[in-house]
Structures are given as structure tokens and as C-alpha cells.
Image (tube, rainbow, N blue to C red):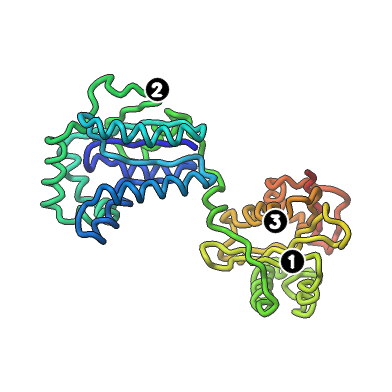
Amino acid sequence: MDLIVIIGAGAVGKMTVGQELMKITDFRLFHNHMMIEPVLEIFGKFDGDVISRLREDIFEAFFKTDYQGMIFTYMWAFDEQSDWDYIKGVSDRFEATGGTVYYVELIADREVRVERNKTENRLKNKPSKRDLVVSEARMLREETKYRVVSNEGEIPFKNYLRINNTRMEPAAAARKIKENFNLPGPRKTELMNRIKLETVREDEIDQLYYMQKASFIPLYEKYHDEGSPAIESIDRVKRRFAVENRKYYFIVKDGARVGVINIGHNDPNEHEVAFISPLFILPEFQNQGIGYVAIQKAFQLLPDVKVWKLDTILQEPANCHLYEKCGFVRVGEEHVVNENMTLVDYERRI
């Protein structure tokens, strides 16, 4: 797992650049004050030992995720050996996973940083900075007591980038970091972490049925397909629910039920062939990548399946694109339903 360490003086923009970098990469932001602020709030003072232990817990848990890596911000006192040792310790742990560590140093003129100390984003995320008189005085004290800007050639690391962001927008600095280190763009990792499949219980069939009708009615109004799930009876849904080798799952995003997927085997003696039917997402949650993630989750639920099958409407290119993106290919003949609608079969073979 990779690590990007963003370093620099107070209010130079480490967190803000990190926020922008998180938007365009598969890295998550762990800025310095995420642990400092809760400790200040609970204990009423800075406690370095507690903050360090909390950071360690975050690192350990993060290593178990599927993200490309983490963005970690830190105000490095270059004249303090303990800070060198700390950064080395953190970097060693990420490199031990086989990852790469990148170092980004931001520098900006003092008057610019004084103004940045007052920004809405900074004060929103760092309550301890809201007393502007105190926070400005503390910031100036830190940079006179410690050397928080590196000397020329002092940082020996291969993957090191220094950016003067005095007059640079955070998004521009983030793009420069991404391009300089050739960092990968966002993947579906975050959405995979936010979405899960929950088994539908028998007493939840009414909700499933309501969601099915709401999801398919736009297609029914468009194609007037008499076999549409939008107009099938709840008894038919109950019969499908009762099939021993098929199972309904709610697609849950951030705790909300946003769709449904039904997967399983038509033949009780066949476990290497599975079907997806139906799969639907509520209209207000469509076009967010949820269907793609739900299908990936389905693959994980039935790892022994060698052939996955489904059908979809030929005249709905977004649906066809989704399934092809998931590895499905068109097979067999087209099935004309009416003059406006044709069904096509898809398979994914492993």
C-alpha cells in the first residue's frame, strides 16, 4: 500500500491539497488534525501519546482496505530528530507492504498562510484554530521555534516533490502531485466499501415489491412490455423469493436501501451456472456506479460459479455498457418483445 506524506508549515494548505488529491486518486486523506481535535475536545489539552496510539490504530485498520494508499499530512520539524524518526517509522510500515512512499513539501509566503489560517474550510475541520488570535500566534511561534521548511537538498528521498503553492490553487497543486508521481485515478474502491448486499427477509417482500415497481415503471412507460417487472403481481415475486436456489438481496449504500439484486441457480444440482434476474436500482440512485458494485458483490457471494447469465433491453445502451464493463458478452439470438423493445442475452464465463 502506498503513502503520500504532505509536509509543510502551519496553514500552508496540506489538508486542503490533500482533499483535492483524494478526489482525483484512489488515496484516502488522513490529515494530522483528525486525531488531534478529538483528543483536545475530550482531554482539554494536547496529549501526544494518545494521539500517536490513535494514529497507529488507523494505520493498522487501513492496511486491511483495498485502497491504493493514504495521504498523510504532517508538520515536520526538520531540526528535531524525533520527527525524522517518526516519519521514517510510518514510511517503513507502508514500504513493508510493498508500497511506495511519496513526499510532498508545500511552501508558501507567511502573509498568505496567515490569510489561509482564517479560511472556512480550515476552521470547519480544525476547531482548535477558531480562536484566530491564538491560532495565528501559535502558528508564528511554531515556525520560529522549529525549522518547518527543509533546506535545499536536505530531503534525500527519491520520490520527493517541492511545491511553492503561494499563488497556486489547491486543485492545481493536487494535479501537479498526481502527474509528477503518475498516480492512478479513482477506482471503485470507495463505493465498494460503502455498498453491501443484505439478504431480503420474507417479511420485507412488500418493501422489495414497492422498490421493484418504482424502479421499472419508467421502462414500462417507455416500452409497454407486458412482461415488465413493473406490473407483475406480488404473488409472482413471492414465488421467486421461495425458490430454494435463488436469493434476493437489498443493495444498501451508506445504510440506505437503494436497489435489489436476485442471484442464484435455476437447477438445484448445478452450482457453476448462476443467473442475475432481476437487478434494479431506484431511479434517484441510478447512474452512480451502484449497479456495477452490486454485480461485483454478487460475484463474491458465489465464488464457485463459472458462468453468469442475464438478459437486458437492447435499446438501453447504458444497461448493455454496464454488463459489458462487468465482463459479460452478448450470446445467442435477439428476442423481439414488441416493435420498440428487444431482449438480448449476456454471459460471463470465468
Left or right: 270, with 117 as reference point: right
Q: Earlier in the sequence, mark 3 or mark 2?
A: 2
Q: Secondary structure at mark 2?
A: loop
Q: Which numbered disc covers residue 301?
A: 3
* Rendering coords of residue 13 (x, y %): 28, 41
Q: Which residue is mark 1?
A: 247
Q: Secondary structure at mark 3?
A: helix
The answer to which image quadrant residue 102 occupies is: top left
| Few, some or many residues within 10 Å of mark 1 (<14, 14–19, 20+) | some
Q: CA distance from mark 1 to mark 2?
A: 52 Å
Q: Quadrant of the C terminus?
A: top right
| Few, some or many residues within 10 Å of mark 3 (<14, 14–19, 20+) | few
* Rendering coords of residue 150 (x, y %): 24, 27
| Few, some or many residues within 10 Å of mark 2 (<14, 14–19, 20+) | few
- Determine contact: label 1, label 2, CB under 8 Å: no
Image position of 156 with respect to 15: above or below: above
Q: Along the line of sight, which residue is nearer the eye, 96 or 268? A: 96
Q: Secondary structure at mark 1?
A: strand
* Rendering coords of residue 279 (x, y %): 70, 62
Image position of 144 with respect to 257: above or below: above
What's the residue at 21%, 33% (across, down)? 148
Q: Which residue is mark 2?
A: 158
